[in-house]
Structures are given as structure tokens and as C-alpha cells.
Image (tube, rainbow, N blue to C red):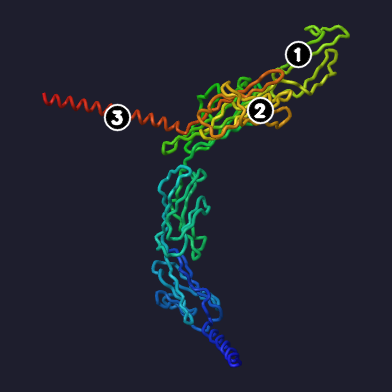
């Protein structure tokens, strides 16, 4: 046991001395494979961990170009060694094609080497097509002519923002683009740590790629009055459409269809009959002859002053004459008002300043909502009526009907967002063409029964294909008639020849 302890105490220090001797002056930063740009300066690194005790050699393709810090005479204009005791980085000036090759830094039995690739051209960028539909797959390629084992990455930028990075072995890039990429600039360039980042753009392809990404219209409606206008004023709404290619625009409501393609809807000297739903529709055709469309609607509410009517009852005459000591009732009715009247004030003829104020104004129900509602087959529909009434309309006095038929009781919701205002909503899920029709919400009050009609239109996804099928059938009929005509001409000619 004692002998083993003695051997251990002797053997370990000997190993440390041998390791210190053999591993002295280790090259801690060896050269790495480098990409150099033609006519620029490149650098090969070689750094030690402590003061040099042996000779440092730089060789290119087994030819000595420097010993320690001294450059061979024939290479003094080409190379230079960095300053510093531990720094033996090799600088190579005015890079040419003959500078490509293997560089070695030798010291104390170590000889790490690296290859320098000389680049004289930019990347070559290409794509399979210059036009694509939003959501389609687009194929790009980026090549620079260096072997697959060369260092560095091929990097794609879209409008100066990095989007995709790969090594040389992967020159193809496949991606799905959307409308945000329309008109964007696609560029591929070579990047590597041995090239200064300020020079990466010198490797970018000269023929930058700019794609036209086509997409269907996206419609929005803007007005400054939130769909409200005072009777007699002018109402203006602008239909804004984002589309590529440019879409055609048309305004319509349930009473008319505009012949103008103007994006602005302008109604002069607005009357109450103008109240209703106005829809902006936009349509375009993509390069594959596919038609795309979109629409948005705004409900125009025409506001006007209250229209009053009085009803006199009791012991008074129709003129309001009454015998002193008798009683009479005068009922002030708000026949029409938009928005609803908030208060009524009475004034006697004997005074211009004494008013009788009544804040609880009873009126018949006013119902507002869209007059038209479109939904794709298989989608969900939400038909909403807003009812303003005093007294308050309860759920028991609100009904829904389709085409003036049976009362609908399922999927009907009632909410009271504010005061005497009630929202009633009819929800239909996974609609079909059979759900199309006129839906009527009815409010029953002590004054009058009021209703509002919403026309539901379920759009069939096969409507375009039906038109295409008709066109194909017509073409087939024309071709058949041509074939029959040619056959008759041929038969007559044969008969004439035989005669």
C-alpha cells in the first residue's frame, strides 16, 4: 500500500511535466475555411496561447510564405502577419483566383489547415413564376457556383428582412406567400463570418425578384356619421377595396342598383325612404380565371324631428273647450321620431315660460336592422332586430316568422343593452339554400304592431361552376354541329365524284 502511494506521488508530477513540455504553445485559434471576395482582402487566423518558443510557419499548398513574422521576399506585397506576440493572423491582399488553395499554420508539431474559396460573382436568384395567388406555393432557387462543402449560408431577404436561411447543399426554397408579399422585393445573398458583414450585400443577386401576389377583394366601408344622417342633408359613404388585380365596385340596396363604379355613395337631400341597407360589392378575376368577390353593408338611419298628435277625451270638446270644474284628458302621441323622443313639454297659451315636462314618453316600437343578409352555404347566420319602444317590449311580445308562415321559436335570443331598447337575434347554423327567404321580426305593443323584414340569401359555392358547365355544354354543341356539317359536305362530295 505504501509502495503504491509513493509511485502515485512520483508518477503524477512526471505526467504533468511531460504534458507541459509537449503541449506548450498550443495553437488555440486555428485557421478555418474562408470565403474571399475577388480584389478584396482576406484573413486566415492563427493564434497561440502563450509566448512562442518554436518557429511558426505559414504555407500555401506546401509552399512556405512566412516564417515567424517574416514574409518571404517574393510574397511581401501579397501577405502580412498581424502584430502581437501571440497573433500570427495572415492577411492576404488583392485577392485573385490564384490565392485559392490550402493554407497551413505550423508550430510545435501542429499544422491546422483551411481552404480559401475565391468568389468572383453574385448569387443567381430565380423563381418558377412571377405571378401567384395568395396562399399558393412558390418555388425559389439561389445558386452562387461554390461547391456544397463550402462554408456560409444562402439567405433570402424580403424587403430587407431575413426570411429563410440554408447552407450550400440546399439551394431551393419553397414557401407559401400572401397578399402582404405583393410587390415585395426578394433577394438572396451569401453570408459567412469570414466575410465582413458590410460586404455581404456584394454577393446579393442583381436581378431582384418582385412578385405579383393576386388575391380577392377585401371590402370596408367608411363614413363620418356612423350610418346616420339628418333628413334633408347629404350622406356620403366610401367603399374601400384592397384587391389585386383591381376590383370593380358596385353599390346597391333593396330598391336600386347603381350603374356607377364610383367608390363613393352620395345621397343628396336625403328622405326617409332612403333609410335601409346599402351594400358595396367588389369583384375581380385572378390570372387562372377564378372570380373572387366580397361585400360589406351599412345600415343608413335617417333622423328627423318628432311628429306629434294629440287626442282629447273626457268632458272637453274637440276644440278643447271645457266647462269650469269639469275634467279632460289630453294625450300627446309621438307618431314618428328618429331617434326616439326623450321628453315631451306642454305649454299653455297664457304663458310662454311655464312648461309642463313629461319625461316618460310612450311611443310605438321602432325597429331597425339589416334588410339583406348574405351567407355562404354551410355557414352561420345571425339575424338581428333592434327594437326601441315605450313601454318596454317583453320577450313574450316579440316573434319571428319566415315568409309570413309559422312562428319560429328555436334559437331566438333576447337581450336588453340599454333602457327601452331590446335586441332580438335569430341564429341559424350550417345554413342551406332551403333557409333562404324573408324573415320577419314582429313587436307587439299597446299602441301598434310593428315589423321588420330581413331577406336572407344563401350563396351556393357551385354557382360559378354552374355557369362554367353551361359554357362547356354550349361549346360541345357547337363542335357537334360543325362535325355534322363537315360529314354532310364529305358525303355529298363522294356522291358527286361517283356520279
Residue 359: give x, y in percent of width and height.
79, 23
Query: What residue did someone put label 2 on?
Result: 386
Front: mark 3 or 2: 2
Camera-side residue of 439 and 145: 439
Compared with 424, 175 (above or below) is below
Image quarter where the N terminus lies is bottom right
Is residue 151 visible in this depiction of the protein?
yes
Left or right: 321 with respect to 40?
right
Q: How far apart are marks 3 and 2 (CA)?
A: 57 Å
| Image location of residue 461, percent across then percent down | 47, 33
What residue is at 67 percent from the left and 19 percent from the top? 449
Question: Where residue 286 sits in the image (x, y, percent)?
Answer: 44, 37
Question: Is residue 321 toward the left or the right of residue 410 in the image?
Answer: right
Q: Is residue 425 above or below residue 117?
A: above
Q: Which residue is drawn at 43% across and 70% down?
A: 115
Whether the residues at callouts 2 and 1 have beta carbons within 8 Å, the answer is no
Amino acid at each position: 500500500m505504501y509502495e503504491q502511494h509513493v509511485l502515485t506521488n512520483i508518477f503524477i508530477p512526471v505526467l504533468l511535466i511531460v504534458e507541459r513540455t509537449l503541449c506548450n504553445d498550443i495553437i488555440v485559434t486555428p485557421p478555418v475555411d474562408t470565403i474571399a471576395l475577388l480584389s478584396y482582402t482576406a484573413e486566415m487566423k492563427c493564434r497561440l496561447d502563450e509566448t512562442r518558443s518554436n518557429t511558426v510557419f505559414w504555407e500555401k499548398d506546401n509552399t512556405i510564405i512566412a516564417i515567424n513574422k517574416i514574409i518571404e521576399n517574393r510574397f511581401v506585397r501579397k501577405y502580412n502577419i498581424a502584430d502581437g506576440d501571440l497573433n500570427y493572423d495572415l492577411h492576404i491582399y488583392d485577392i485573385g483566383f490564384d490565392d485559392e488553395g490550402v493554407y497551413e499554420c505550423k508550430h510545435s508539431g501542429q499544422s491546422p489547415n483551411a481552404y480559401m474559396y475565391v468568389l468572383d460573382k453574385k448569387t443567381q436568384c430565380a423563381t418558377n413564376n412571377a405571378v401567384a395567388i395568395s396562399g399558393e406555393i412558390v418555388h425559389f432557387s439561389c445558386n452562387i457556383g461554390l461547391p456544397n462543402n463550402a462554408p456560409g449560408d444562402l439567405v433570402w431577404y424580403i424587403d430587407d428582412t431575413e426570411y429563410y436561411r440554408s447552407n450550400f447543399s440546399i439551394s431551393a426554397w419553397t414557401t407559401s406567400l400572401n397578399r402582404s408579399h405583393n410587390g415585395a422585393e426578394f433577394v438572396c445573398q451569401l453570408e459567412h463570418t469570414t466575410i465582413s458583414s458590410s460586404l455581404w450585400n456584394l454577393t446579393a443577386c442583381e436581378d431582384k425578384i418582385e412578385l405579383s401576389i393576386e388575391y380577392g377583394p377585401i371590402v370596408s366601408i367608411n363614413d363620418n356619421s356612423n350610418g346616420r344622417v339628418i333628413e334633408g342633408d347629404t350622406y356620403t359613404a366610401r367603399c374601400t377595396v384592397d384587391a389585386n388585380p383591381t376590383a370593380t365596385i358596385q353599390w346597391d340596396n333593396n330598391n336600386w342598383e347603381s350603374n356607377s363604379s364610383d367608390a363613393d355613395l352620395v345621397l343628396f337631400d336625403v328622405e326617409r325612404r332612403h333609410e335601409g341597407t346599402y351594400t358595396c360589392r367588389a369583384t375581380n378575376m385572378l390570372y387562372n380565371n377564378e372570380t373572387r368577390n366580397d361585400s360589406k353593408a351599412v345600415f343608413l338611419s335617417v333622423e328627423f324631428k318628432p311628429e306629434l298628435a294629440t287626442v282629447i277625451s273626457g268632458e272637453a270638446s274637440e276644440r278643447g273647450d271645457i266647462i269650469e270644474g269639469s275634467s279632460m284628458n289630453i294625450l300627446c302621441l309621438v307618431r314618428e321620431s328618429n331617434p326616439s323622443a326623450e321628453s315631451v313639454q306642454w305649454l299653455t297659451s297664457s304663458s310662454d315660460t311655464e312648461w309642463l315636462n313629461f319625461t316618460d314618453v310612450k311611443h310605438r316600437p321602432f325597429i331597425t336592422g339589416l334588410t339583406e343578409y348574405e351567407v355562404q352555404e354551410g355557414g352561420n347566420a345571425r339575424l338581428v332586430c333592434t327594437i326601441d319602444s315605450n313601454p318596454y317590449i317583453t320577450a313574450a311580445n316579440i316573434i319571428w316568422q319566415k315568409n309570413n308562415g309559422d312562428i319560429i321559436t328555436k334559437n331566438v335570443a333576447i337581450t336588453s343593452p340599454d333602457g327601452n331598447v331590446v335586441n332580438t337575434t335569430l341564429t341559424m347554423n350550417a345554413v342551406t339554400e332551403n333557409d333562404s327567404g324573408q324573415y320577419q321580426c314582429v313587436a307587439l305593443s299597446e299602441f301598434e304592431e310593428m315589423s321588420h323584414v330581413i331577406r336572407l340569401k344563401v350563396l351556393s359555392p357551385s354557382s360559378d361552376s354552374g355557369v362554367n358547365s353551361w359554357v362547356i355544354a354550349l361549346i360541345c354543341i357547337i363542335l357537334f354541329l360543325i362535325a355534322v356539317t363537315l360529314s354532310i359536305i364529305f358525303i355529298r362530295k363522294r356522291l358527286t365524284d361517283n356520279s
